[in-house]
Amino acid sequence: MINTVYRLVAPRRFEIAFEDIDIFGKNAIVRPTNLSICNADMRYYLGTRDAKVLAEKLPMALIHEGVGEVVIDPTGRFKSGDKVVMVPNMATQTDDFIAENYLRSSKFAGSSMDGFLQEYVEISPERLVLLPENIDMNVAAFTEIVSVSVHAITRFERFSHERRDVIGVWGDGNLAYITSLFLKKFFPESKICVFGISKDKLSDFTFVDETYLTTEVPDGFTMDHAFECVGGNGSPIAIEQIIGLIKPEATISILGVSEYPVPINTRMILEKGIRMFGSSRSGVADFAKTVEMYREHPDIVGYLGNLVSSVNVVRKTNDIRDAFELDTKKAFGKTIMKWEE
Amino acid sequence: MVYGVVLAGGIGSRMGRVDKPKQYLTIKDKPIIIYTLEKFVACPGLEKIIVLCPKQWVEHTKNLVAKYIKPAEDSIAVIEGGSSRNETIMNAIRFIEAEGKLNDETIIVTHDSVRPFVTHRILQENISAAKEYGACDTVVPATDTIVEAVDNKVISSIPDRSKMYQGQTPQSFKALKLKNMYESLSDEEKEILTDAAKIFVIKGEKVALVDGEPHNIKITYPYDLRVAKSLLEDEEDD
């Protein structure tokens, strides 16, 4: 079938291309319905990625956060009309020790192959996770970023010691919001403290125990473990503050993406015996676990709904550009495209 | 019930010296009509598809469906077209009637078999508009100035371009309404009505506009086939 693919060909410029996809092959065909714009998409859109990277990767269809409805699944696992979340990571091999999202051979939608900005997505049924029938699809659209938090928390459980009385979360953006929400669900007994720079944003974190401005940390405050969800230019100062405040033998989970190398205080890491680990992306198991959490704790979906910054109906190529431009202006939350193109 | 009606009745007289109708020519080793049918098969709103083609091509078309899109075979009926575009559409409606499925809610989405670049959105918006208005036509704003020459020699008028559109397909209708209106026409009227939407227009009924796409091209001339091939075959070089 002739499938229309909406590719970014240069910063701020989308063009359509056509691809013949096999509707009765071994893969499923999914009609995307709700797509969510991620900061990574914006770095391509605005051309803030390294020029060499842009030259190598474009033209490419963006978007790796999205849900849709199954049109055809040759395996019969899904029936036509089933609501599913699409997993952007595509493993090409398996490994007993290395998760699929860390295998260098894996491909990723909207990064090393076309993303979900397509009329139809041809995708292995293995990379689809069934959603609850009545879920808010504008929230489900950004399950990918949620699954990244779930993935990091799952690994944190594996790596950290079990005294988790106080867990600090640095950041007041989407990732910090999601991570602290899920930390509270996974560790209800733990005191979750969030540190940010915007009082206004921090006021939305009503489900955590404490929120503080990074400039107003109470004297004597300390924590057992921490999550860094800042990224960008704020990374160095956040990591420095975490290392300074955290208890010995703590585990620090790094989640914020930074385009530049970040200097860290190795002397204090050594002195405190700190374990620091990074997490990036997620795999099918993390998506399944995330959707299970949606089912078990429906209030999560409600809280995540507060992150929906705007819902934009996209019928024509210009509407895609408008949604991306709108995302440049938002202070917080997620820009959703209701995909009718 | 919503039916896709794929019109493959043309014999391609504008295509130059070709040995078969243009809808059976191939792009990347697949007939154009199959690309079009795949779009209809993938559209969840369409429950059954009727393909209408010249009598001598009916078996050939059935064979192509069996060869390329066998899993969809049960939802595709291939039947003979009529002597004109509207007669062909009427054949489709008669087929629906014979199945006992023709009622006030029956929608037909009629489409040229040689427009394989139709999109999911266009099909869905056709279904919605036909349900709401009873009839709709897929159009794109005219990019060239349209001139009218009543005597085919000199310009008689130049309409305001901002109000001009170029018709594409699909055109979609409430099937029973279309049939009743068509049957109320005289033979002379039927003769001059080359377009099904015009039946609604001359009867004073509303025909809604659905946004088409510039790439929803009709493969009519050899040039169009080259364009279609280049749009699809460039992908191989990526």
Image (cartoon, coloured by chain):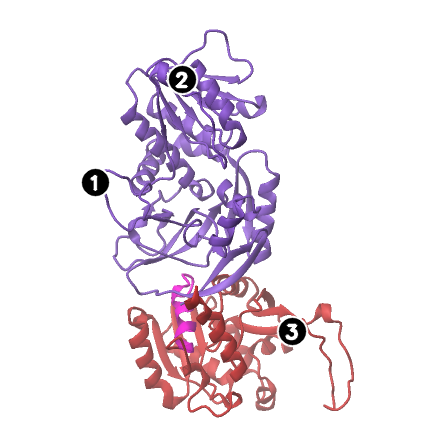
Chain colours: A purple, B red
User: Which residue is at a point 44% across and 87% down the rendered structure image?
Assistant: B21
- What secondary structure predominates along the stretch shown in magenta? helix
Q: Amino acid at mark 1?
A: Asp
Q: Is residue B141 left or right of residue B71?
A: right
Badge 1 marks a residue whose secondary structure is: loop
Disc number placed over residue A267 in the picture, else none = 2
Query: Which residue matches tag 1?
Result: A96
Give me the chain letter of mark 2. Answer: A
User: Badge 1 sits on which subunit?
Assistant: A
Q: Amino acid at mark 2?
A: Arg
Q: Using residue B128 as the reference point, say whether residue A30 is left or right of it.
A: left
Q: A157 or B166: which is nearer to us?
A: A157
Q: Which residue is mark 3?
A: B204
Query: Furthest residue to the left?
Result: A96
Residue mark closest to the camera, 3 vs 1: 1
For the residues labelled 3 and 1, the Cα–Cα distance comes to 71 Å
How would you rate the neighbour count of disc 2 (Cα within 10 Å): few for under 14, some for 14-19, many for 20 or more? few
In the depicted view, which residue is nearer to us: B77 or A329? Answer: A329
Q: Amino acid at mark 3?
A: Gly
Q: Evaluate if marks 3 and 1 touch, with contact meaning CB atoms under 8 Å apart.
A: no
**Quadrant of the rendering where the C terminus of chain B is positioned:** bottom left
| Magenta span of residues | B31-47
Residue, x 35% and y 39% (percent of image)?
A: A282
